Image (tube, coloured by chain):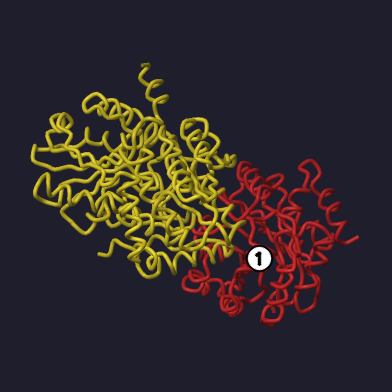
Chain colours: A red, B yellow
Amino acid sequence: MNRINKLFQEKKNILSIYYTAGYPNLGDTVAIAEELERSGADLLEIGFPYSDPVADGPIIQASSKTALDGGMTLKLLFEQLKDLRKTVSIPVLLMGYVNPMLQYGVANFCKSCAEVGVDGCIVPDLPMSEYEALYSDVFKENGLTNIFLVTPQTSEERIRKIDGLSNGFIYLLSSSATTGKNLQVSESTEAYFSRVAEMKLNNPTMIGFGISSKETFDKACQYANGAIIGSAFVKSLKSDNVIASVKDFMKTFKP
Amino acid sequence: MNYFVNEKGYFGDFGGAYIPEMLYPNVEELRTNYLKIIEDEDFQKEFHQLLKDYVGRPSPLYLAKRLSQRYNANIFLKREDLNHTGAHKINNTIGQILLAERLGKKRIIAETGAGQHGVATATVCALRGLECVVYMGEIDIQRQAPNVARMKMLGATVVPATSGSKTLKDATNEAMRDWINNPLDTHYIVGSVVGPHPYPDMVAIFQSIISEETKKQLVEHTGSDQPDYVLACVGGGSNAMGMFYHFINDENVKLIAVEAAGKGVDTGHSAATTFLGKEGVLHGSRSILMQTEDGQVIEPYSVSAGLDYPGIGPQHAHLFKTLRGEYVSVTDDEALQAGLRLTQLEGIIPAIESAHALAYLEKMKFTGKENVVVCLSGRGDKDMDTYLKYFGL
């Protein structure tokens, strides 16, 4: 059984943390992963930066720019992750945009993921139809899971289709928004979370976008198997003392 | 060979809809409705009435005699510069605002480079009483001040894009982010033949009025609806696609698309996408774009804010790859000289964008018999500062 399925079988209230590879310093990628695992994170999403991240708000945009200016590339990221599995045992996903993947070659990308022990990917601008037609086989051959997003506007029919193509979890966006906004659980958001829960999907769900504090995390966990924190974590990272800033942030979640 | 969009939203290998799930419902709503709406009789009637009475169409096809003498060919200028607001951009914004109304949208967003599309969008929003927000790169705001003033007077909110190169590409990113955050009441009027399907096809359809008229006008001038050459400048490529559209299946008509080489194709300061680009995905479609080996988008450069874009529309990528179109480039200097030349030979000050198409005439050889149509996509009022500084006038 892969690490992701195992995690969801064994745990509730799963805490997933997103951060951008190569931020705040080019060489921080693996050290941050190690500290997050030590501090109690259950799942990691490592972002490979892109110059034009349209689904992201200002914080992740800025971290992507810093990482790219510092020299981060997909090739370098896979080099950095070469020995990841010697020190990190929790599931790891790579998250990024489709164009860097296309230039690296999707088959090569999947192979490199498998080699370093990455468990899956989240590629927001890779359409479901293209994934299904062109890439699902090579993902499967390399034991990778592809995580799809669902928004409050996604139809039930489409959610069913996504559920059928998924093997890991489904990423529920708290609202239709770019990253880095605060979660407001209004009546309509609640209705949407409940609507998805009542669909009794095959895959577990994680809520992301707008989760910034212990309070919003706990709220999200009422409706899903866990939640994902991105911008709030990235914002808290301090370039001169990265490990201490990771510890400080995680203390607020796992005191 | 099919040069037009297929049922999957592709032009050959290019196109598609590479968008995050947040945009799926918006784009899907457009995809399933755009042809139905556009082909509706009432829509067509209203669209053509506005193009006639409000935009001032048909725009003239002018036989430029002194230019023709210089090049030893019959040079016709398709006068999109005479449209209301001064460029071809309004053909598309009229179409899209009527479509947005029929989709029940209350708020309009747009991106703009030179400001022509922003002005054209602000204009139709004023005309129809809809809220308008225009994203514009911070650098473009500085170099296109008159257009910023026009948008403001028209009641639009102009939001500076401060990320990346602070030009058209970044304004487009910001507009897409706005749309993600406002999925229900907002229509995004994309200004060029770029973006996820159905935008490239939809914008091309609205701009195709340019070649539709040109064909009829050519018959009056020459007795044939087929010229030997059609030329247009290409940034994202909307005026070029409008100018090419009804000639694409006339295989005897040579289509020439002129890109902005900036300071020179090999100088690192260029926007000549087909020379410098590779296949990839930008702003929601698979096309050709300028990028690093790692797939990061390269900041383009051109003296012309309207051509300063690192990609081309997917239909252009298809015309380029199938060799149906010839994609060439001219430098800043060549374009500015061509702008001055047209001004002094014909009394027409062109937009620097359009001057790129004119500049390529210098590199062509004619025998005196050829009929050549150049799309004069916009007027040069907005570029006076650049012209004056360059020529020290």
Q: Residue at x 15, y 54 (%)?
A: B252
- On the image, the x and y values in percent for residue B97 come to 44, 54
**Badge 1: how crowded within 10 Å, few (<14), some, or many (20+)?**
many
Give the image location of residue B374, x and y in percent: 24, 41
Farthest residue, direction top: B393
Image quadrant in which the C terminus of chain A is located: bottom right
Residue A29 in the figure: left or right of residue B82: right
Q: Identify the residue under disc 1.
A: A118
Chain of the residue under the numbered disc 1 shown in the image: A
Residue A171 point in image, percent of width and height:
67, 68
Q: Can residue A75 be seen in this view?
A: no
Q: What residue is drawn where x is 14% and y is 52%?
A: B225
The secondary structure type at the circle numbered 1 is loop
Q: Is residue B69 above or below residue B23?
A: above
Q: Can residue B28 be seen in this view?
A: yes
Which residue occupies the foreground of this view, B89 or B271? B89
Asked if B354 appears above or below B206 in the picture, the reply is above
